[in-house]
Amino acid sequence: MNKAEFITAAGFAISLLFCMTQTEACPPSCSCKALGERKGLQIDCSSRKLKEVPALPVNTKRLYLQNNSLTTVPPGALDSLLSVEEVKLFDNPWNCDCHILYLKLWLEDISEAALANIRCATPAPVRMKPLKQLTGNELGTCKRSLPTKCLEFFWKDLILIAIAIVTFILVAWALKFSKKVVYQINLRRYTTRGLLLWRHASKNHKLH
C-alpha cells in the first residue's frame, strides 16, 4: 500500500468518525431553533402528545418536553446531550417505578429545577409525589429490562471507542509512513549529490 492509499484510508476513517458524532437532524415531531452565538439548538417538543423521547441533536441546549404523554425515558437516551442547559419535563404522566431511576439520576446532574417539577402519575402509592423526593425503596428494583437496555448502550459506546482507536492507528501509521518516505527521498537526494560530486572530482583528478 503506497502513501496515497494510506492517507486515503486514514481520511476515510476520520470522516466516518466525524459523521457519527455530528449533530442529528431536528426531530420531525418538534420545532428547532438555532441559538446563534450560543452555538446550540432549542428543541421544542412540548404539547405534541409524544409517548417516547425522540432522537435529539447532540448540540441541544434547551429541551422542552413538557405536556406530553411520556411515562418513562429509556436508559442512555439522553447521554449524548452533553451541553444541555435547560430542560422542561413537567405535565407528563410519569410512571415512577424502577425504570424512572435513569431520568432521576440524569436530572440530578443536569437540572435540579426540572427534577423538582416532575410529579408521578403512577403507580397509585406515589401518585402526585415529586420524583425528587422518592427513595430507592419507593421506586422498586428492576431485575431484567434495565440491565438489558444498559447493555445495548454499552455496546454502542464500545463500537464508538473501537472506531476512535482504529482512526488513531491509521493516522499514526500514515504519519509514520510519510516520514519514512520523506527520509528516503532526502537520502536518495544526498546520495545522488554525493555521487555526482565524486564523479566530478574523479574527472578532475584524471585531467590533472
Image: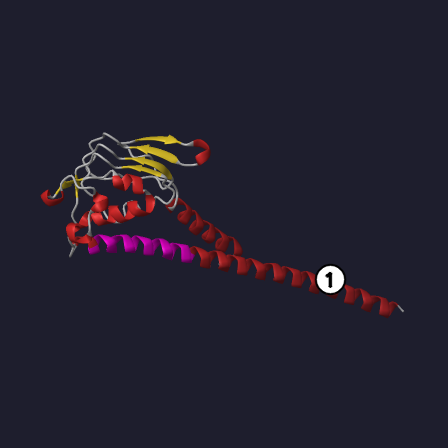
Q: Identify the residue shown where x is 23% and y is 29%.
A: 47
As displayed, is residue 29 above or below residue 205?
Answer: above
Residue 35: give x, y in percent of width and height: 41, 32
Residue 69 colored in magenta in the image: no
Q: The residue under label 1 is which amino acid type?
A: Arg
Q: Residue furthest left?
A: 124
Q: Residue furthest right?
A: 208
Q: Quadrant of residue 71?
A: top left
Could you tell me which quadrant the C terminus lies in? bottom right
Q: Which residues are magenta?
A: 147-166
Residue 28: give x, y in percent of width and height: 28, 32
Residue 148 colored in magenta in the image: yes
Q: Identify the residue shown where x is 53% and y is 57%.
A: 175
Pointer 1 residue: 193
Residue 48: give x, y in percent of width and height: 22, 30
As displayed, is residue 112 above or below residue 157?
Answer: above
Residue 178: give x, y in percent of width and height: 56, 57
Give 82 or 32, whichever is nearer the viewer.
82
- Magenta stretch secondary structure, dominant: helix
